[in-house]
Image (spheres, rainbow, N blue to C red):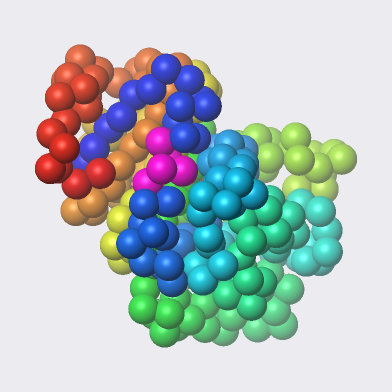
Amino acid sequence: MEVVILGSADEVARLAADRIAALVRRRPEAVLGLATGSSPTGIYAELARRTAAGELDMSGVRGFALDEYVGIPPAHPESYAAVIAREVVGPLGMSPDRVRVPDGRAADLEAAAEEYDRAIAAAGGIDLQLLGIGANGHIGFNEPTSSFASRTRIKTLAPRTRADNARFFASPDEVPTHCLTQGLGTILEARELLLVAQGEGKAEAVAAAVEGPLTSMCPGSALQLHRRAAVVVDGAAASALRLTDYYRHTYAHKPGWQRP
Ligand code: F6R
């Protein structure tokens, strides 16, 4: 796993945007896994800036959102379908018909979840999966004790997650109780994982994911099983890591010939 500690949230956003832009230049029809929430917003803003400046063309890129709430209409401003349309597809000049979000309104949610995994496979799999991490260690909405083999499926949100996400809703009661999320097994099939985290509130989860034991109690620790995973964090999110000197030294001396 590559661990990159940067000076600010802006630097995290720029480095992650650099990596996504490099992939898109290599492969204009790349398939991206798209996280929502606060962590990637700076990355999307940076990619949008580069798109508006004519430096980047994401029109051929395909996308699969990580997750979606169950039971709120797609038009609700906090449905991930709405967030992806507003913060990603539009500003990045992506084609709406090339971007999928799990259907949290499907009459048969299990069938919708299975179809989502099939659609990812039919697209050739995800080239780069962008991830945030919950304060409880979740990635996607794979809450603690999620199976490392799990596929896209219905999950019950942990009370901590509902409390953390209440800031997006008018009242805590409005936060949905269930979601559809790519499974840990689904996420691990992406060819590359890029997890970003900012702020002290993520420090314990980042340390558990990177340096803790491989355990379903910290779903983020599944990254340890991936051959090509990068964790890009600011100093505050890195503050509970033990090997910070090693990570900083490794990144500062990374040879040009080593893969980004
Ligand atoms: C969002 C997602 C979640 C978030 C995590 C962190 O699609 O899958 O895992 O990445 O809850 O949320 P923020 O970034 O809002 O702190």
- Vertically, is 154 above or below 235? below
- Vertically, is 190 above or below 169? below
Residue 50 placed where, x, y %? 56, 45
Which residues are the magenta region? 15-19
Q: Main secondary structure of the magenta part?
A: helix
- Vertically, is 190 above or below 105? above
- Vertically, is 71 above or below 254? below
Residue at image x 52%, y 77%? 116
Residue at image x 19%, y 53%? 227
Residue 150 placed where, x, y %? 38, 65
Residue 36 placed where, x, y %? 60, 49
Asked whether residue 16 is drawn in magenta, I would say yes
Residue at image x 76%, y 40%? 168
- Of 248 and 146, the residue lying toward us: 248
- Of 99 and 142, the residue lying toward us: 99
How many numbered marks appear? 0
Q: Dividing the image into 4 quarters, which one contains the N terminus? A: top left
Residue 56 placed where, x, y %? 51, 54
In this image, 150 relative to 255: left or right?
right
In this image, 186 relative to 88: left or right?
left
Q: Is residue 230 visible?
A: yes
In this image, 179 relative to 119: left or right?
right
Asked whether residue 251 is drawn in magenta, I would say no
The quarter of the picture where residue 94 lies is bottom right
Residue at image x 68%, y 40%? 165
